[in-house]
Image (spheres, helix red, strand yellow):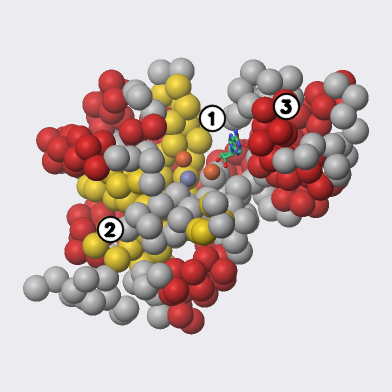
Amino acid sequence: MKPRRAGETPMSFADLHLHSRYSDGTYGPEELVTEARRCGLAVIALTDHDSVEGCAAAARACAAAGLEFIPGVELTVEVGGDELHLLGYFIDTQNGFLRSRIKQFQVARQNRIREMVARLHRLQVPLSEQSVFALANCQSPGRPHVARALVQAGLCRSLDEAFERFLRYNRPAWVPKFKMDGREAIELLHQAGGVAVLAHPGLNRSDAVIPGLVEAGLDGLECFHTKHSAATANLYLELAARLGLVVTGGSDCHGLSKGRPLIGTVKVPCQRLEPLRARAAELRRAARPSAQP
Ligand code: AMP
Ligand code: FE
Ligand code: FE
Ligand code: ZN
């Protein structure tokens, strides 16, 4: 019998892909935990883009609500010229090297906002830099904050308009994003005790890079995701089994979507977390050998 954690019942569930207002989500960590309770989850992971800023508050809120919290992150990486997202689970959010590399992501994101605003100014769109940073109010701002600030300032009628006119790929205020090399990112997560999982592979259309990432130490595949069909999930379940990778899943909730949050709509049974936990324990032992008696 596997030990059961607080809040877990034989049919308890985890949502391992959630964003908060510390990146491009709209819920604060506390609100996410309230929503997690409402939909009966036993375990959640916060996986903000290039940020762990919300993890401490989420951990506190989970502890108070009797939920298990897994500290996570979703790193923006580049592999073979393509942007991919790499999830890290059970990371030590205090790890110095992780924090310094995350800082680098965040400085680049803040500079990117400045460049987007400068491009808007060249297009005679008078959005103030300060209004974007004030609205984002976090270390890891992105295009959704620029879009919201454009709407708030009355410069666009909707977020869709903001993306369509200015922010979408190759639109006039689009600025490329800083990406970390995929192999380096896997190492970075590992040295912080984190399990490295390829996010939503079904959205990437770059399965050819997976074997190389596995060679570089990739631990898992996010098989269950809001935008994966059942057939896609099955494809990656088979691939994970073939390559000896752990399986994860989550909703990728960013807040309200068509009036309802996605949290809990994609969830994995807690029994499925055992290989992920086992891999995290292995990495922790390797990362901090002196901590073991
Ligand atoms: P960034 O990381 O700054 O490039 O922003 C990416 C985020 O922008 C995505 O996670 C989405 O939340 C959002 N996004 C991207 N494209 C659109 C779009 N066409 N309409 C609304 N939101 C979008
Ligand atoms: Fe996002
Ligand atoms: Fe993603
Ligand atoms: Zn995500």
Label 2 neighbourhood size at 10 Å, few (<14), some (14-19), many (20+)?
A: many
Amino acid type shown at disc 1: Lys
- Cα separation, mark 1 vs mark 2, equals 29 Å
| Labels 2, 3: front one | 3
| Labels 3, 1: front one | 3
Visible residue check, residue 289: no
Q: Ligand 2: which quarter?
A: top right
Residue beneath label 2, please?
268
Residue beneath label 1, please?
179
Q: Quadrant of residue 290?
A: bottom left
Which residue occupies the foreground of this view, 288 or 108? Answer: 108
Checking the image for residue 166, the label placed there is: 3
Q: Quadrant of residue 163?
A: top right
Do labels 3 and 1 touch, CB within 8 Å? Answer: no
Q: Is residue 51 left or right of residue 11?
A: right
**Residue 71 percent across, percent down from the top left:** 44, 60
Amino acid type shown at disc 2: Val
Q: Which image quarter holds the N terminus?
A: bottom left
